Amino acid sequence: MASRSESRTQLVEGLMERFPQVPREAVIKEDLLRGGMAFDESALSDTVNDASGEVKPKSYFIFSFDHSTLPELGAAALRRPPEEIVLTGGPYDLRRTVVSVRVNPSSPYRVAADDNGVLGLYLDGVRISDVGLPPMPDYYRHTLENGKSVMEVAPTIQWGYLIYLTVFRVCQYFGAKEECQYCDINHNWRQQKAAGRPYTGVKPMDEVLEALAIIDKYDTAKSSTAYTLTGGAITSQIQGKDEADFYGQYAKAIEERFPGRWIGKVVAQALPKADVQRFHDYGVRIYHPNYEVWDPYLFERYCPGKERYVGREEWHRRILDSAEVFGPRNVIPNFVAGVEMAEPFGFKTVGEAIDSTVEGLQYFMSRGITPRFTTWCPEPTTPLGKANPQGAPLEYHVRLLEAYRATMEDNGLSSPPGYGPAGPGRAVFSVSSFMDSLAPEAAAPEDQVTEPAAPGKA
């Protein structure tokens, strides 16, 4: 933990010195993800809900990923910040690093233009890198027949690599006794609607297919390589369908309309094996049954709905079962890195938190399943965000990167498919640095999705 007199620059440089095996780019990226960044008005996109500007704007594709509510963001709520930024150069000689934008007006990091109009990232008032902004993609400039924007129906992230299809914008784990304590999906829905922004609750199939057709037509460089189907948990039914059939119907339609154009991924609950098989039958090739946090005490308290409806042990059993359907390499559960240290119940020391997280990594990696993680953003409307506005210590995130890579290498695993290239200067995955921290030579052939040996066999 930083002392009160220690500047953020001293903290960052101290960790770079202590952990030289962790790419310096990843240290800064994790700090930006956990604590956010501020924007001068010169760095905003000039885009509200349309695609008239030159910069690809933040789409709020599922969560807010901000440290303030929309009404508190000021100009950043009216002139959207960019979806992501890319860092290069500066005194740390940063290799190209793609970072998801999480807005925090009080952050010591600020994106601003210099006297020549050149954007940079400033830490404690000192310019530490050049900043590149994502150009507005051609497909964002075209609307659906009903006037909806492609950005609303099928936004792309990870510098255009991934199409993010949040086809159900709310979660049926609802209220304090069911919602995950770090998740603001339901609040984000409410604040987007309150701001008068278009934010479709259940995305109609025809709109999704029309938006994808526009992307397919105008993405001539084929930069978009994968799509993710996701949304809130479904504990009963949506439109008469359970979770597997609701999300699976989109995959089936996409694969029939655009066979082989993108790698199909789905983020859903850990479902029974028969339901998981339906996902695979519908054309999904990568399954993300997120386990969120490893420690059983924390899982029960931070994921009360998941504990109530499924339970931690059953959740993990289903993850292992799903590897028999998709193959272990194509089962990639996410955890929310940092909530292990969230008050009031989290671990009190970085070492204890890392030990717990590594126990979970080893549990899955020893079975050929490679988890990945999202760096926790303490959104202010969530219970854990309110109690922990600073998030987890940066040291935790840096040591996690070191431990993650070591555990992967110990188990003979390579970077998972569906995330683009690995390695500093190459990675595009923007919501954590796990891909930035892996050695490029450790990566398997990019995005190679392998099938299980035979139906029903591991």
Image (tube, rainbow, N blue to C red):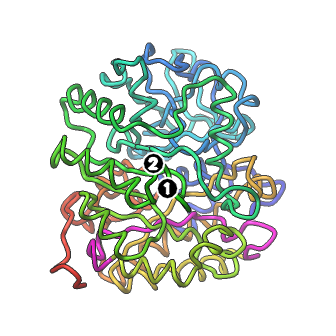
Outermost residue, front side:
240
Please state which of residues 225 and 165 is positioned toward the viewer in this rendering.
165
Q: State yes or no: residue 338 in magenta.
A: yes
Separation of residues labelled 2 and 1 (CA atoms): 6 Å
Q: Is residue 295 visible?
A: yes
Q: Secondary structure at mark 1?
A: loop
Circle 1 is placed at which residue position?
Answer: 432
Whether residue 290 sits left or right of residue 110 in the image: it is left
Q: Residue at x 76, y 31 (%)?
A: 72
Residue span colored magenta: 323-348
Q: Quadrant of residue 175?
A: bottom right
Q: Residue at x 39, y 53 (%)?
A: 247
Are the residues tagged 2 and 1 within 8 Å (C-beta)?
A: no
Q: Quadrant of residue 444?
A: bottom left
Whether residue 340 sits left or right of residue 331 in the image: it is right
Q: Is residue 20 visible?
A: no
Residue 374 placement (x, y as % from top left): 52, 58
Please state which of residues 91 and 143 is positioned toward the viewer in this rendering.
143
The N terminus appears in which quarter of the rendering?
Answer: bottom right
Q: Amino acid at mark 2?
A: Ser
| Mark drawn on residue 38 | none
Number of labelled discs? Answer: 2
Circle 2 is placed at which residue position?
Answer: 430
Residue 451 placement (x, y as % from top left): 18, 71
